[in-house]
Amino acid sequence: SEMRCIIVMALAHELLSLQGGPSCAYYLALAQTYLLKEDLSKCEECLCEAIRIDYMNPNVWAQKGHLCYLKRDFGEAKECYERTINFVEDAADMHFVYLRLGSIYLEEKELEEMVEAEDALSEANALSNTNAEVWGYLALICLQGGRQLEAEQCYKYTVKVCVSALLWGRQGRQHVGCR
């Protein structure tokens, strides 16, 4: 993780040098570095600057959503994620945007948002169908909606993905959402 911080800092420095001053990409890379270091206030400052420079950048809004999610400000995270998916251009990490947005909707447990949660999680699943966490959330939604057979199928996929990850080792488990 320390090496990743160094790499991102070097990238941020390069972006600063190449573009003759701070750019949106610079502030975004710097925000990611602060997030990795768990310095959430500096991360937020950098994201505010990135938004000021390029308000229409989906990656900035996705990153702000992740920051809010980690701060457990789910209302603000939800707004950021919804803004992200409304852009024509996708953010680089749409899978996580859909996964976290789906989990927020699921936590809110409002009927209308349960449909939205299922849509968001289905989209995350379409982007990467080897994530046990997504399959698990889909199983919960199906159970809450009274769809027992679909819930069982999603649960079986959850187990299948985790077992597969166990065969591939610890790194695979982390990648697919198995703990």
Image: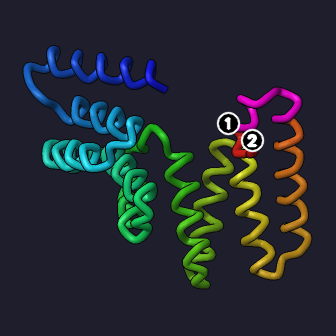
For this rendering, which residue is in front, 105 or 167?
167
In the visual, does 140 lie left or right of 68? right
- Spatial CA span between label 2 and label 1: 9 Å
**Which one is earlier in the sequence, the residue at label 2 or at label 1?**
2
Residue 64 visible to the viewer? yes
Are the two marked residues, 2 and 1, in contact with CB atoms closer than 8 angstroms?
Answer: yes
Q: In which quarter of the image is residue 24?
A: top left
Q: Tell me the residue that label 1 is attached to.
A: 175
Q: Quadrant of residue 129?
A: top right
Label 2 sits on what residue type? Thr
Q: Does the magenta stretch include residue 151?
A: no
Residue 33 image position (x, y, % from top left): 34, 32
Residue at 40%, 71% in the rendered image? 75
Magenta segment, principal secondary structure? helix
Residue at 35%, 23% in the rendered image? 8
For this rendering, which residue is in front, 137 or 45?
45
Residue 18 image position (x, y, % from top left): 16, 15
Label 1 sits on what residue type? His
Q: Name the quarter where the C terminus is drawn.
A: top right
Residue at 53%, 67% in the rendered image? 104
| Residue 56, placed above or below residue 33 | below
Q: What element carries label 2?
A: loop
In the visual, does 12 lie left or right of 110? left
Residue at 76%, 31% in the rendered image? 170
Q: Tell me the residue that label 2 is attached to.
A: 130
For mark 2, does the 10 Å Cα neighbourhood hold few (<14), some (14 to 19), or many (20 or more) residues?
Answer: many
For mark 1, does the 10 Å Cα neighbourhood hold few (<14), some (14 to 19), or many (20 or more) residues?
Answer: few
Q: What stretch is highlighted in magenta?
A: 165-175
Residue 65 image position (x, y, % from top left): 39, 55
